[in-house]
Image (cartoon, grey):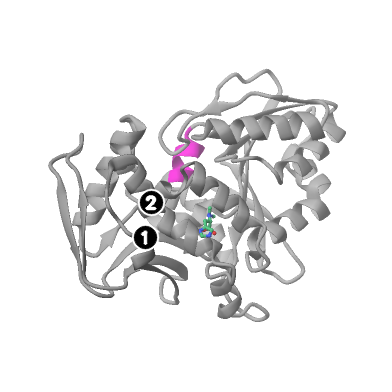
Amino acid sequence: MPFISAVSDANSVLESSPTEAVAAEARIGLISRPRTLAPWLFYDETGSQLFEEITNLPEYYLTRAERSIFATNADEIIERASRVNGNRLPPTLTLIELGAGTATKTGILLAAAVCRQGTVVYQPVDVSVTALEAATRNIRANVPGVTVRCQVADYTTQPLPENRLPNTRTLALYIGSSIGNFTPDLATGVLRNLRAQLLPGDQLLLGTDLGPGPGKEVATVLAAYNDAAGVTAAFNRNILDRLNRELGANFNSEAFAHRAIWNEAESRIEMHLASLAAQRVRIPANSAGDALNLRFSPDETAHTENSYKFTLNRVKDLLASASFHLTHTWTDPRHYFAVNLATAI
Ligand code: AVI
């Protein structure tokens, strides 16, 4: 799951219990100006279900485009990730997935890996136990030959599983454009943290959403975050409902409008919650401090998410900033999305 605040800040917040982390994050974000609410707050049980719904929306092209790239190129992806220089034995790949969720697209890559090497060890890492249970059920039912070893962890702060066998190579999957939910500096930090746990020659498969350009209108990107059925609006407002449920706050989430805007200068979609009127909200005293009495003026916003959109050059530079060398990129026929393979150097 993505986080937007500084990795070091997120560390200290997330090391506490879930409710304490929510209380601390809400306090830090809601007293700052402009107000913010970190996007990891989206993903309680309701938010995770809403996100699953988003991935099936007609406007949310990202999931379909990435899945189609896997469906067309899975064998080549696995072959390239296994490639060696010279005449050494090809390594056996172990697949680790950061922020695996329910692993719906990953089965395509796992099936290709089983086809190539007979069996495969798959290690999904996620903060959500429920998502990992669903991932395990899904992979066990659909891809024979896979040994699933789950790890409940926040991959931005906690170490990845480590039990490497001889002649194995790690293929780390960081797909779904989750990297796009970090500012550029933090994105480099997340990839450096990953790189520090890999060996030279290990591989990273990075999914990135591409920015508007020839054949991809700004309106297409915007619609993905402002769907007609209002699911993304519900996903955004769920942060406020979550603060009510978990902290006893008294937000009226319907009194906040979902706003998605395209920030051209930063090449990102921003999501905000905008107060529809002058209103007061109270969050009772909790582990993070005294009660908070918040006053929202009409149209005052809380910034909830950034979703960066990339050029291929930007992807290459980002990878290089974390000591990965980009070796191949696959895109869908409309050039909406890119799947990038890189080697740890
Ligand atoms: C998880 N992440 C890549 C999604 C995105 O597209 O930035 C989260 C999301 N926010 C609104 N819709 C989907």
**Can you give x and y, in whole percent of width and height, for residue 245 in the image?**
36, 43
Residue 238 image offset from top left, x and y in percent: 43, 54
Q: Position of residue 338 (x, y in %)?
A: 66, 60
Q: Which residue is mark 2?
A: 241
Magenta-colored stretch includes residue 177:
no
User: As shown in the figure, which amino acid type bears the numbered disc 2?
Assistant: Asp
Q: Which mark is residue 253?
A: 1
Report the predominant secondary structure element of the magenta stretch: helix
Res 87 visible: no
Front-most of residues 69 and 168: 69
Residue at screen point 77% across, 57% down: 68
Image side of residue 326 versus residue 126, left or right: right
Residue 195 shown in magenta: yes
Is residue 23 visible in the rendered image? The answer is: yes
- Mark 1 Cβ inside 8 Å of ligand 1: no
Count residues near mark 1 (Cα–Cα under 10 Å), then give few for <14, some for 14-19, many for 20+: some
For marks 1 and 2, the one nearer the N-term is 2
Instruction: Tell whether 299 sits left or right of 257.
Output: left
The stretch in magenta equals: 190-196
Q: Label 2 near label 1: C-beta < 8 Å?
A: yes
For label 2, count other residues whose C-alpha is less than 10 Å away and answer few (under 14), some (14-19) or many (20+). many
Q: Hey, which quadrant is residue 221 in on the image?
A: bottom right
Which kind of residue does numbered mark 1 sit on? Ser
Looking at the picture, does residue 312 appear above or below residue 104? below
The residue that appears at 64% across and 23% down in the rendered structure is: 149
Residue at 62% x, 54% y is 53
- Asked whether 130 or 248 is in front, the reply is 248
